[in-house]
Amino acid sequence: MSAIEEKKAKTDSGAGFILLFFILGLVSSLLTGWVAFPKLLYSQKSQPFDFNHAIHLDMVDGCESCHFFREDGTYAGVPKLAQCIDCHEEVQGGTEDEAIFVEEYVANYREVPWLIYSEQPDCVFFSHAAHVKSGGMDCVTCHGNIGTSTSLKPYEENRITGYSRDIWGKNIAGIKKNTWDRMKMDDCAACHRENGVKQNSVQTHKGACFVCHK
Amino acid sequence: MKSTNTQTKKYGMVIDLDKCTGCGACMVACMAENNVPFKENESNKQDSITWLRVYKMDNGKPYPENDICYLPRPCMHCEGHAGHSPCVSVCPATATDYSTETGIVSQIYTRCFGCRYCMAACPYHVRYFNWWDPVWPEGMEKMLSPNVSVRTRGVVEKCSFCFHRYQLAMEKAHYEGREEIEEEEYQTACCQACPADAITFGDLYNPKHKVFELKQTPGAFRLLERLGTNPKVFYLTSRDWVRKQGDNYLKNEGQVIAKGGH
């Protein structure tokens, strides 16, 4: 091998190394950005105890027995302890979750500090009456299958904003397969645009800010 | 595409200055209703926040001709020309907006970045800047209204005509299967607090609402009407000097012809 050829071979393998490092670097930054960062961004919290919607639905009639509208049209949301006490004065079944519920909460008349998956920031005004009563919409459209589930999923909190992950969604590429995957401002606004809901803004000619904000 | 827009409304106020005693109940009601922050020491009024402010006017004459008048000043919710009120036109962040459904000028605190261009543009001084984060006296944060979001340092705020009350009234209407709300279902806090009944609130377009007739009272005027801001707050008075102080008149300008009726 001549000296020139030798040198060429060296640079060739040098280029190979650079390419290898480039690919390694790219892959690791992609992994950090797409896999590690979302994991780090959200902290997982579990509900005070598990709740089984499915078995309760067999015993009461419909969602309204727990999630009802008040007379002034506001939505009661997550049930208060008073709605459970009639049945849970004493332990009904044999599950550990119920034991926690009865011993720690019912016995002490303590409200359960439920974590709310769909909770919006303070500046947002949302009306269940507008969507469920006037709009005739189904709970599943916005909440998915929580209402018929047998257990509660973990609650994921954004470490920076403190908001629930259900607002910004799981898919960081922004792909939305179901209507309930995400409930960001754009998701509300897109449906409002489709349905022509109060597109009265002088600035944007779209939804006026004072429909969803307060 | 189905449209779920309701009838076009134009909410406004008529304030009878002959009835106003300057008691300040409207200011107090407004502060409490809207979670308006205050300072430990309010003696420096320059950076106080008062969504509704009662001004004292004086005819400048010596006793016995001396006369005073109190003028409550909420946000005028100017319509300008087709909703281009002074503040809305200048906001670089779309933080303030005009709704053609209600005629209300909105302020979205989370969008505002505090440039204060709107404050410079507003001829009525209705906009206020938060120089500090609000500090509530111990325990008072529990008394805050959940219907109005609290503001942070660095943003501008102003009177919203108690828009949250409109939202709640609409929510009740939705629940009861109605599309429209009644006059008494949406009233501002200041209007309800006034012991002299000087403030009337309603839809200026709706002949069934009290403000519809009242705004056409001879002599009704609006502040700085000549600027073309097209404000939605009308004032009534029997006193000519009050009307004259409400706008910039030439010294010897002739008999004022009542405008209003828009």
Image (spheres, coloured by chain):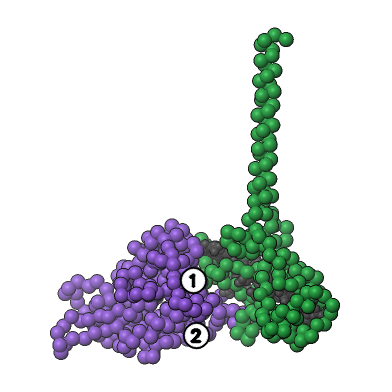
Write the residue at 61% across / 75% down: A127
The one nearer the camera, B50 or B160, is B50
The quadrant of the rendering that contains the C terminus of chain B is bottom left
Q: Which residue is mark 1?
A: B150
Helix, strand or loop for disc 2: helix
Q: Residue furthest top?
A: A2
- Colour used to depict chain A in the structure image: green
Instruction: Give, as a three-letter code, the residue at label 2.
Output: Glu
Secondary structure under tag 1 reads loop
The spot of residue A135 in percent (x, y) is: 66, 74
Horizontal side of residue B32 vs A4, given as left or right: left
- What residue appears at the point 38 percent right and 85 percent down from the top-left corner? B25
Sequence-wise first label, 1 or 2 = 1
Splitting the image into 4 quarters, where does residue B256 fall? bottom left
Which image quarter: residue B177? bottom right
Quadrant housing residue A149: bottom right
Q: Which chain is purple?
A: B
Give whichever of B104, B214 is nearer the camera.
B104
For badge 1, the amino acid type reads: Val
Query: Which residue does the numbered mark 2 point to in the structure image?
Result: B183
Q: Is residue A41 above or below residue A155?
A: above
The answer to whether B109 appears left or right of A198 in the picture is left
Labelled pair 1, 2 in contact (Cβ < 8 Å): no
**Residue depicted at 34% across the width and 69% down the height:** B47
